[in-house]
Amino acid sequence: MDFIHLIRAFKKTLYEIDNDGNVAYFTSNTIFKLEKRVSELLEENQRLEKDSIDYVRRDVYEMLFDKCERLGERIKSLIPKKAIPKYDFCEVPNDSEGQEFIDNVKKYLNTKKYKICVRGQHVKEEYKGTGATAYGQSIEQSTHLRVYIEEK
């Protein structure tokens, strides 16, 4: 049932209380004003519905915005972060015992997921001050070794 018909159907039962506390039934003039206002509101509603075809309701927009934020955070968590090279073993002596240790690490390392890198650490006394180690020294010129294990 339309709202206007509902008002017409119940116009005899509707009442209002005036300032003196007396019950007064709505007059036909009051009903007419209410029907006119309801008609105006219905027309405005239809006009807004036609105009708002390209618009999204605010609650739908907020829901979509929240989902986009959560998806953005999820994407950021799935993007692999660039591994900062941190050494896992340091001060490994550059002698037969240290070489044996590094060979065993290479032997048992999961090479499908990790890669190993060995660099020199601390310059030998005979190379200090010669300029041969200005940009870092080789393993042969080092007293100790540093081992980096990184994800591929």
Image (tube, grey):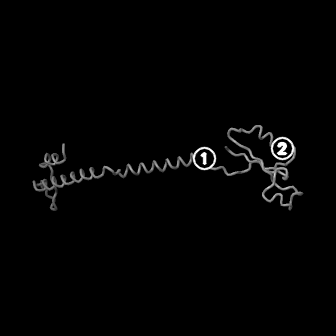
Q: Which mark is residue 35?
A: none
Residue 139 placement (x, y as % from top left) = 82, 50
Classify residue 132 as left or right of residue 26: right
Disc marking residue 99: 2
Q: Name the kind of residue labelled 1 in the image.
A: Pro
Q: For this view, does 120 lie left or right of residue 11? A: right
User: Dot 1: what SS?
Assistant: loop
Query: Gap between marks 1 and 2, in whole Å?
Result: 32 Å
Q: Nearer the viewer, residue 44 or 94?
A: 94
Which quarter shows the N terminus? top left
Determine the residue positioned at 24% across, 50% down: 46
Is the residue marked by circle 1 packed among few (<14), some (14-19), or many (20+) residues within 10 Å?
Answer: few
Residue type, mark 2 in image: Gln
- Marks 1 and 2, the one that precedes in the sequence: 1
| Residue topped by disc 1 | 80
- Residue 94 in the image: state x and y as whole percent: 85, 48
